[in-house]
Image: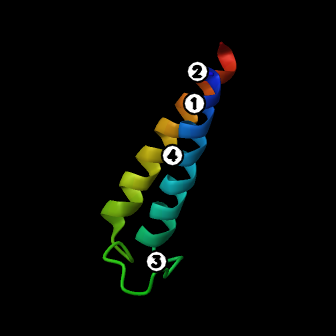
């Protein structure tokens, strides 16, 4: 059960992080009025969140 939760949270964090990176770099303009579009600070936050998600998935796989 714990592995499933770690996997879900990790994958969710990776996907949301990649969304933030794409919006922060201006690659994805969805939703159109998002305050994150073309704001590099959100790209950095997204990269950090995706990295945390990858660490969670890796930790889940090692157990």
- Secondary structure found at label 2: helix
Mark 1 lies on residue: 5
Residue at coordinates 54% horizontally, 30% vertically from top-left? 55
**Residue 59 screen position, x and y as percent:** 58, 21
Q: Is residue 40 left or right of residue 22?
A: left
For marks 3 and 1, give the one nearer the viewer: 1
Q: Is the residue under label 1 in contact with that under label 2 (CB below 8 Å)?
A: yes
Distance from label 3 to label 2 (Cα)? Answer: 36 Å
Structural crowding at the residue carrying mark 3, measured as other residues with C-alpha within 10 Å and reported as few (<14), some (14–19) or many (≥20): some
In which quadrant of the rendered view does residue 24 lie?
bottom left
Q: Earlier in the sequence, mark 3 or mark 1?
A: 1
Q: Earlier in the sequence, mark 4 or mark 3?
A: 4
Q: Which mark is residue 13?
A: 4
Distance from label 3 to label 1 (Cα)? Answer: 32 Å
- Secondary structure found at label 4: helix
Q: Earlier in the sequence, mark 3 or mark 2?
A: 2
**Residue 40 screen position, x and y as percent:** 35, 66
Q: Which mark is residue 2?
A: 2
Structural crowding at the residue carrying mark 4, measured as other residues with C-alpha within 10 Å and reported as few (<14), some (14–19) or many (≥20): many
Residue at coordinates 68% horizontally, 22% vertically from top-left? 61
Mark 3 lies on residue: 26
């Amino acid at each position: 059960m714990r592995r499933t939760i770690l996997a879900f949270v990790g994958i969710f964090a990776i996907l949301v992080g990649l969304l933030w990176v794409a919006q922060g770099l201006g690659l994805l303009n969805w939703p159109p009025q998002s305050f994150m579009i073309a704001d590099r600070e959100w790209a950095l936050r997204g990269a950090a969140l995706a990295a945390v998600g990858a660490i969670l998935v890796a930790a889940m796989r090692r157990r």
